[in-house]
């Protein structure tokens, strides 16, 4: 009797632990809401007792997106080695998508937004912040990913403070120019193009090799096949979906900030509506996923294919980015 009671107690203890970990996992896997940019910028400027200048909004949003990565429910999960984080893969994939967009923005801020020309000095704060964001996202010790990202955020705060410095010795600048914005758009285009391609591979398809298309004299290091059979591994479909979802979430916040800081440039090029359309497409990509899992039906089958739906929104946003780039070049 005693043994039966003991066995039953162990069973219920394990059951309780399982449901507890499951509940925590579900809570930690919830995606953060969009950032209220106006409220964040107003609060930050009030705390520093300054008036926002050009670049203040973009820097603030980059800081906030980075902080969401570390401070959302459950914190940063990608490098956790204990349950329940160890058994979660959707949120770590989401985190990596956000991180990729943070890295792209930090890189462009370092080499373009903060510099007046190619021969000008690199801002010391951005020079310190950008490499720290490139640490392996799964590092958990000596140094941990969180510690490096936190240090990068501190440097971004220092850069933002230098932007609004009133001591007469401006050690930081943010140049909202059309050529700088084009540099950022080109980075984003490559990123979105990759996501669109990877998402569309959720259904197997044959593709003609176009690696050397458009240039008769082009060469490559090794001979490629004429036709490619492309299909995402079944176990990776949800990871790619959530990575793309995280990337589009972060890009949405950053483009809203770009719309504010580059307002004069966009209006001068008559390109503001184009940017707003890109933002609309990205907003659509953040609609709630009501299915308990990422479905992978065939293109015209009875079951939805969430990857193809996401690929559609990303492709439309990317096409609009190409149009925006053209407007900034010729407008």
Image (tube, rainbow, N blue to C red):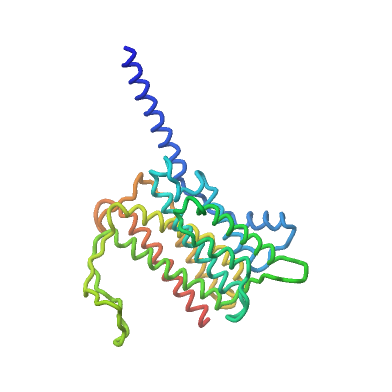
Q: Residue furthest front?
A: 142
Q: Residue furthest right?
A: 167
The residue at 39%/26% (across/down) is: 13
From what the image shows, is residue 204 above or below residue 289? Answer: below
The residue lying toward the viewer, choosing from 42 and 81, is: 81
The residue lying toward the viewer, choosing from 204 and 233, is: 233
From what the image shows, is residue 133 above or below residue 32? Answer: below
The part of the image, by quadrant, that contains residue 35 is: bottom right
Q: Position of residue 100 (x, y in %)?
A: 46, 61
Q: Residue furthest top?
A: 1
The residue at 45%/46% (across/down) is: 80
The residue at 34%/25% (across/down) is: 11
Left or right: 165, with 95 as reference point: right
Q: Position of residue 277 (x, y in %)?
A: 48, 66
The residue at 22%/74% (across/down) is: 225
Left or right: 99, with 310 as reference point: right
User: Which quadrant, please, contains the N terminus?
Assistant: top left
From what the image shows, is residue 291 above or below residue 277? Answer: above
Q: Position of residue 313 (x, y in %)?
A: 40, 62
Q: Position of residue 98 (x, y in %)?
A: 48, 57
Number of labels in the image equals 0
The part of the image, by quadrant, that contains residue 300 is: bottom left
């Amino acid at each position: 009797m005693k043994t039966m009671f003991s066995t039953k107690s162990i069973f219920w203890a394990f059951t309780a632990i399982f449901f507890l970990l499951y509940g925590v996992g579900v809570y930690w896997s919830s995606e953060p809401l969009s950032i209220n940019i106006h409220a964040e910028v107003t609060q930050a400027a009030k705390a520093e007792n300054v008036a926002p200048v050009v670049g203040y909004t973009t820097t603030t949003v980059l800081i906030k997106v980075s902080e969401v990565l570390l401070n959302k429910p459950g914190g940063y999960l990608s490098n956790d080695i204990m349950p329940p984080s160890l058994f979660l893969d959707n949120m770590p994939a989401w985190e990596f998508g956000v991180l990729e967009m943070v890295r792209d923005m930090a890189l462009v801020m370092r080499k373009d937004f903060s510099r007046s020309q190619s021969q000008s000095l690199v801002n010391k704060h951005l020079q310190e912040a950008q490499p720290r964001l490139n640490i392996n996202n799964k590092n958990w010790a000596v140094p941990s990913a969180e510690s490096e990202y936190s240090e990068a955020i501190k440097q971004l705060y220092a850069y933002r403070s230098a932007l609004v410095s009133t001591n007469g010795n401006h050690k930081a600048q943010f140049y909202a120019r059309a050529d700088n914005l084009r540099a950022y758009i080109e980075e984003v285009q490559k990123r979105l193009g990759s996501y669109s391609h990877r998402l569309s591979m959720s259904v197997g398809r044959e593709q003609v090799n176009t690696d050397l298309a458009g240039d008769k004299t082009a060469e490559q290091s090794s001979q490629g096949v004429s036709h490619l059979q492309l299909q995402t591994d079944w176990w990776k479909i949800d990871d790619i979906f959530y990575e793309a979802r995280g990337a589009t979430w972060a890009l949405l916040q950053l483009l809203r900030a770009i719309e504010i800081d580059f307002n004069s440039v966009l209006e001068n090029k008559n390109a503001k509506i184009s940017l707003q359309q890109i933002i609309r497409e990205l907003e659509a990509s953040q609609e709630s996923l009501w299915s308990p899992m990422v479905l992978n039906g065939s293109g015209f089958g009875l079951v939805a294919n969430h990857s193809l739906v996401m690929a559609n929104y990303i492709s439309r946003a990317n096409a609009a980015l190409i149009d925006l780039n053209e407007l900034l070049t010729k407008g």
